[in-house]
Amino acid sequence: MTPLPKVQIAEAFADLFTPSRYKLYYGGRGGAKSWAFARALIIRALQKPIRILCCREFQNSIRQSVHQLLAEQIDRMGLGAYFRVKETTIEGVNGSEFLFMGLARNIQGIKSTENITIAWVEEAQTISQPSLDLLIPTIRAPNSEIWFSWNPLDEEAPIERLKESLVNDSVAILQKVGWQDNPWFPKELEAERKRLLSHDPSAYEHVWEGHFKVISDAVIFKDRVVFEPFETPSNTRFYHGVDWGFAVDPTAVVRCFIKDQCLYVDVEAVAHKVEIDQMTLLFNQVPTMRRWPIKADSARPETISHMARRGFNITEAKKWNGSVEDGITYLKSFNKIIVHPRCRHTASEFRRYSYKVDKQTEDILPVVEDANNHCIDALRYALDGLIKMEPRTPIFSQTALNRIRSYGTRRRI
């Protein structure tokens, strides 16, 4: 038998060869998740005899499975001599076996499947909770693994709840992958990616960046932001803003300037879990931070004082009841907001920053979703002094509120 050829798999999928009970890979189109999973499983099946269950929620025929994908990868990898591709199964000459099955409406079939070494759940965004509850305890052979691959769709999906429960679990590998991680990303898909980005940025975030699908009309800055390269003038007035990170949230630093009634965002620095003694390194990623005033989130006065002692001209930005909404109004007052492509976090937030949506009625609510906003918050802080407090008319006068409170006390409401 001829020697095994060298097989290439993208670096983002290297942990598929690290022993772990759960492996969850998710993200947008073009990340080659299915392609990499197929190749990794073929290699694992070559290394020693194992049983691999390839499943999905619904499989009415073998054509709805990854059977064809595996067969094609075996051929491309030059491993046809090591496998027998049959109509409904694939067998290795060393005794390895690939099985294919739908989870829904196949309870007895799943329960009777024994000695599975690896279960691969493809298109896991569609898997139901009953199917998960059935599958997980069924895969119980020593050192057995369960692999999931999917494109995120709904944050309430069972696979998303499973992912959240495993975030800090040592038995799980969680990896977001996308087109950026695919070293063989084809030019045809690159053209499709750019086309959707220019025509429907909200849909782009879901399809290509792997974020949850949102109602596009709820996106706050829909059709107001342009994502394109530009030259930064040498004699401009820069504005710098900082949003401090808390727990899982990143610290975000942005630089912007105003020209011809347009707001330009040309530099960002974003990082997670930045310790206070490492903050200077983050600030220094923006070359003008030491020469220009900086406005920062007032929630961290001790960090502001620390950075001021390090030579930065940094002060806290003003906040008031309704300052977020007033900031949004001010940002919308520009003819356009132009974000340089190197500011990818800022660009992503502008495409996703939304009003809340009622999950039952899909009504768009007049409440800003507190998410996808770290760079945008930093941008609001940067423009502190330009954003004005808008007058707000209370629903009830103060006298009426006092009477309501008094009445409620008397009636013990």
Image: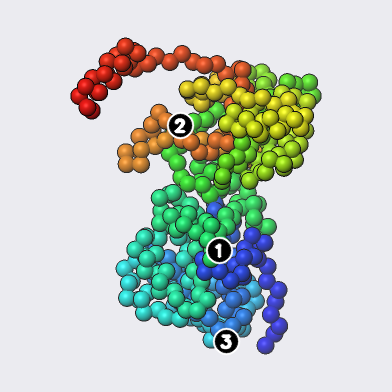
Mark sitting earlier along the chain (2/1): 1
In the figure, residue 278 lies in which quadrant? top right
Vertical side of 100 occupied by 209: above or below: above
Mark sitting earlier along the chain (1/3): 3
Q: Inspect the image, locate mark 2, and give the three-letter code of the amino acid beneath it.
A: Val
The answer to whether residue 333 is left or right of residue 101 is: right
Residue 175: x and y in percent read 57, 57
Residue at 56% from the left image edge and 69% from the top image edge: 20
The residue closer to the viewer here, 311 or 175, is 311
Examine the rendering and report whether any part of residue 395 can be seen: yes
Mark sitting earlier along the chain (2/3): 3
The residue carrying pointer 3 sits among few (fewer than 14), some (14 to 19) or many (20 or more) residues within 10 Å by Cα, namely: some
- Mark linked to residue 170: 1
- Mark linked to residue 368: 2
Residue at 53% from the left image edge and 81% from the top image edge: 50
The Cα atoms of the two marked residues, 1 and 3, are separated by: 32 Å
SS at badge 1: loop
Residue at 52% from the left image edge and 61% from the top image edge: 169
Residue at 55% from the left image edge and 35% from the top image edge: 373
SS at badge 2: strand
Vertical side of 72 occupied by 296: above or below: above
Q: Are marks 2 and 3 in contact (CB under 8 Å)?
A: no
The Cα atoms of the two marked residues, 2 and 3, are separated by: 58 Å
Vertical side of 235 occupied by 136: above or below: below
The residue carrying pointer 1 sits among few (fewer than 14), some (14 to 19) or many (20 or more) residues within 10 Å by Cα, namely: few
In the figure, residue 245 lies in which quadrant? top right
Q: Inspect the image, locate mark 3, and give the three-letter code of the amino acid beneath it.
A: Asn
Q: Which callout, 2 or 3, points to the residue nearer the camera?
A: 2
Examine the rendering and report whether any part of residue 39 can be seen: no
The answer to whether residue 294 is left or right of residue 351 is: right
Residue 334: x and y in percent read 58, 21
Q: Which residue is mark 3?
A: 94
